[in-house]
Amino acid sequence: MKLVVTFSRKAGKKPIIAQVVRDTGILINVERAMIDSSEGEALIDIPDESCTLVKERLADLGASVRILEAGIFLDESECVDCGACITICPQEVFWFDDDWKLQMDESKCVLCGRCIEICPHRALSQKSES
């Protein structure tokens, strides 16, 4: 399960993700992180069954946590199977099947947005969260 963790650096430079791993023993995969001097946001991947425990521990440490429910949407009526998204995607989300039709595995996506920016037909967009 993917979680978006947002935290403020005003309280100091605490290694909250490392603290959660140490406290819970649950391994956390950081898929994307943007951190500056005042705040940070990280996209993490954890086992589904550990979601509640990790969310609670991160909240105890002062982070805001939400389950990532949005992903990338492929509008097949706009897609011309050009493959631009394949070349730019760092996570290998996209590929061609045997009939040269674009396929995607949304579970690999880290929402970097590169595919959305490069798509010449605007066939890719980010789904809105519910």
Image (cartoon, rainbow, N blue to C red):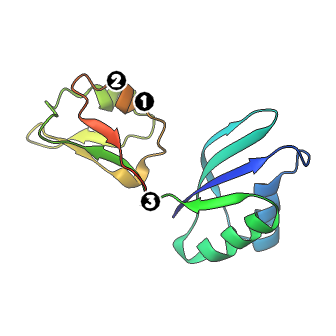
Label 1: how many Cα within 10 Å (few below 14, some 14–19, many 20+): few
Q: In this view, does 88 lie to the left or right of 12?
A: left
Label 3: how many Cα within 10 Å (few below 14, some 14–19, many 20+): few
Q: Are marks 1 and 2 in contact (CB under 8 Å)?
A: yes
Q: Distance between the residues labelled 3 and 1?
A: 19 Å
**Which mark is first along the chain, 1 or 3?**
3
Q: In this view, does 55 lie to the left or right of 80?
A: right
Q: Mark 2 points at which residue?
A: 118
Return the residue nearer the eye: 73 or 95. 73
**Which mark is first along the chain, 3 or 2?**
3
Return the residue nearer the eye: 61 or 102. 61
Q: How far apart are marks 1 and 2 (CA)?
A: 6 Å
Q: In this view, does 88 lie to the left or right of 73?
A: right
Residue occupying the point 75% across, 58% down: 63
Label 2: how many Cα within 10 Å (few below 14, some 14–19, many 20+): some
Looking at the rendered structure, which numbered label has been put on residue 69?
3
Residue 21: percent from left, percent from top: 76, 64
Residue 90: percent from left, percent from top: 45, 34
Q: Mark 1 points at which residue?
A: 114
What amino acid does circle 1 point to? Answer: Arg
Residue 117: percent from left, percent from top: 38, 26
Provide the secondary structure element on which disc 1 rests: helix
Q: In this view, does 116 lie above or below 56?
A: above
Q: Are marks 3 and 1 in contact (CB under 8 Å)?
A: no
Residue 36: percent from left, percent from top: 76, 33
Return the residue nearer the eye: 6 or 50. 6
What amino acid does circle 2 point to? Answer: Ile
Looking at the rendered structure, which numbered label has been put on residue 44?
none
Residue occupying the point 38% across, 40% down: 92
What amino acid does circle 3 point to? Answer: Glu
Provide the secondary structure element on which disc 3 rests: loop
Q: Is residue 115 left or right of residue 15?
A: left
